């Protein structure tokens, strides 16, 4: 799904062909503990609306902030700059952790998938978790590699358009999640 993690992969892949690998690792650093927490604890309880609303409000604001920072830094290019491994790894961690859709997906649909995998015990759940992450890993690795190999053909206008697309994704998703959580809170309190 095109979302914040996909946008940050495009952004980082223009500087490093292994950005997708590192972003996927950062994504896994957040995703695996969440899956195991759901498996062992949260799958037995219904997630209260207050928690869902808090995730949406905070995550939405963080995503808007990331989009604004990307926009502010859009013209800061240094031809000698090489994206560090830590930069892409942290981008995967931050983008995943700040994405309320990711958290809410795992607390709803993801929980249902985990409950199905739970029928096969810890081994079945572990296979599910591993296969799920391998799919993410392959996807972000391939996307980053293709972007890295093709970005030298991009004109300044194409690069600027892609940057604006990434900013729009961050800010758009952030605004959507924030406003949805705000609406959920207002309607619950009325």
Image (cartoon, helix red, strand yellow):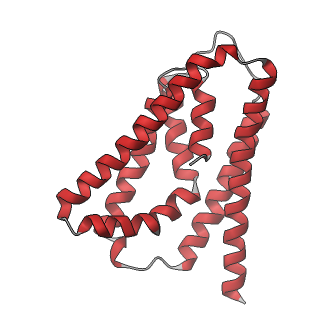
Q: Residue at x 45, y 67 (%)?
A: 109
* Residue 157, picture quadrant: top right
* Residue 112, picture quadrant: bottom left
Q: Is residue 12 left or right of residue 71?
A: left
| Figure check: 71 above or below 177 | above
> Residue 138, can we see it?
yes
Q: Which residue appears farthest toward the right when viewing the image?
A: 157
Q: Residue at x 31, y 47 (%)?
A: 131
Q: Is 158 in front, or is 108? A: 158
* Residue 66, picture quadrant: top right
Q: Is residue 96 left or right of residue 45?
A: right
Q: Which residue appears farthest toward the bottom when viewing the image?
A: 190
Q: Residue at x 61, y 72 (%)?
A: 53
Count of labels in the image: 0
Q: Is 93 in front, or is 124? A: 124
| Figure check: 82 above or below 12 | above
For the C terminus, which image quadrant?
Answer: bottom right
> Residue 25, can we see it?
no
Q: Is residue 34 left or right of residue 9?
A: left
Percent of width and height locating residue 173: 68, 54
Q: Which residue appears farthest toward the top when viewing the image?
A: 80
Q: Residue at x 54, y 44 (%)?
A: 94
Percent of width and height locating residue 172: 73, 52
Percent of width and height locating residue 130: 29, 47
Q: Is residue 34 left or right of residue 183?
A: left
């Amino acid at each position: 799904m095109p979302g914040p993690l996909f946008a940050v992969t495009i952004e980082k892949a223009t500087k490093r062909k292994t950005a997708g690998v590192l972003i996927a690792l950062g994504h896994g650093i957040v995703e695996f503990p969440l899956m195991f927490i759901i498996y062992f604890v949260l799958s037995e309880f219904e997630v209260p609306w207050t928690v869902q609303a808090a995730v949406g409000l905070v995550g939405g604001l963080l995503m808007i902030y990331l989009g604004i920072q990307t926009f502010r830094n859009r013209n800061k290019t240094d031809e000698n700059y090489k994206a560090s491994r830590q930069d892409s790894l942290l981008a995967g961690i931050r983008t995943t952790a700040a994405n309320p859709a990711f958290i809410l997906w795992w607390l709803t649909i993801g929980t249902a998938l985990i409950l199905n995998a739970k029928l096969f015990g810890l081994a079945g759940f572990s296979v599910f978790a591993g296969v799920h992450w391998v799919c993410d890993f392959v996807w972000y690795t391939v996307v980053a590699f293709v972007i890295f190999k093709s970005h030298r053909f991009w004109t300044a206008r194409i690069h600027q358009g892609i940057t604006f697309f990434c900013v729009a994704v961050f800010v758009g998703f952030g605004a959507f999640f924030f406003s949805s959580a705000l609406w959920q809170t207002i309607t619950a309190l009325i």
